[in-house]
Image (spheres, grey):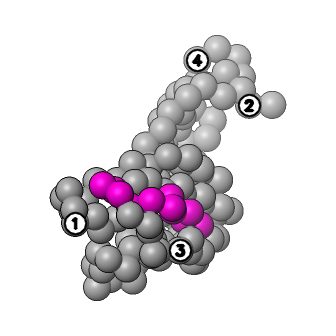
């Protein structure tokens, strides 16, 4: 699960607002992960999964006005790659990149002519394996 609580947008100009000021993203995608060298100190991995995405938009347009767009939910395909590095005992460090290929948010004043978009997320952290 990936949740982005505040994606700020800027498009159009003063007096010609076309997108909301912000939107939120939620991706829930159960995935299978393949560790290439699971018993070594450094283990690269890849993942593939599917689920759904939800986009919630702000009520106001950038530079003022009411947003005519609505929240949307769509299917999503997730692909990712990462690297786990063992530090001490069961504690490891992880870096990862994921692409969530989903439907687009509803921006009726700024149509792209497409039905899908890529949503890239880069992350990292420390985890404890038990």
Question: Which mark is on residue 87?
Answer: 4
**Which of disc 3 and disc 4 is earlier in sequence?**
3
The local crowd at label 4, few if under 14, some if 14 to 19, many if 20 or more residues have their Cα within 10 Å, is few
> What are the residue bounds of the magenta stretch?
54-64
Is residue 61 on the magenta stretch?
yes
Label 4 secondary element: strand
**Which of disc 4 and disc 2 is earlier in sequence?**
4
From mark 2 to mark 4, how far is it between C-alphas?
11 Å
The reply to whether residue 118 is visible in this rendering is: no
Is residue 6 on the magenta stretch?
no
Label 1 secondary element: strand
The answer to the question of whether label 1 and label 3 lie on touching residues, with beta carbons closer than 8 A, is: no
The answer to the question of whether label 2 and label 4 lie on touching residues, with beta carbons closer than 8 A, is: no
Residue situated in front as seen by the camera: 9 or 77: 9
Residue 116 in the image: above or below residue 14? below
Label 3 secondary element: loop
The answer to the question of whether label 4 and label 3 lie on touching residues, with beta carbons closer than 8 A, is: no
Residue that label 3 marks: 70
The answer to the question of whether label 2 and label 1 lie on touching residues, with beta carbons closer than 8 A, is: no
Question: Which mark is on residue 98?
Answer: none
Label 2 secondary element: loop
Q: Quadrant of residue 87?
A: top right
- Which of the two marks, 3 or 2, is nearer to us in this view? 3
From mark 4 to mark 3, how far is it between C-alphas?
46 Å
From mark 2 to mark 1, how far is it between C-alphas?
52 Å
Seen at 43% across and 43% down, the residue is 122
- Which of the two marks, 1 or 3, is nearer to us in this view? 1
The local crowd at label 3, few if under 14, some if 14 to 19, many if 20 or more residues have their Cα within 10 Å, is some
From mark 3 to mark 2, how far is it between C-alphas?
41 Å
The reply to whether residue 127 is visible in this rendering is: yes
Q: Main secondary structure of the magenta part?
A: loop
Task: Please indicate whether residue 89 sits to the left or right of residue 33 in the image.
Answer: right
């Amino acid at each position: 699960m990936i949740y982005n609580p505040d994606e700020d947008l800027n498009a159009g100009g003063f007096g010609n607002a076309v997108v909301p000021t912000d939107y939120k993203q939620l991706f829930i995608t159960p995935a299978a992960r393949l560790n290439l060298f699971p018993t070594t100190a450094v283990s690269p991995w890849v993942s593939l999964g599917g689920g759904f995405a939800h986009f919630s938009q702000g009520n106001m347009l950038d530079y003022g006005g009411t947003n005519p767009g609505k929240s949307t939910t769509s299917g999503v395909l997730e692909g990712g790659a990462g690297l786990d590095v063992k530090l001490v005992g069961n504690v490891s460090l992880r870096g990862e990149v994921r692409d969530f290929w989903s439907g687009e948010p509803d921006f009726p004043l700024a149509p792209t002519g497409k039905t899908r978009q890529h949503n890239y997320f880069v992350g990292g952290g420390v985890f404890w394996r038990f």
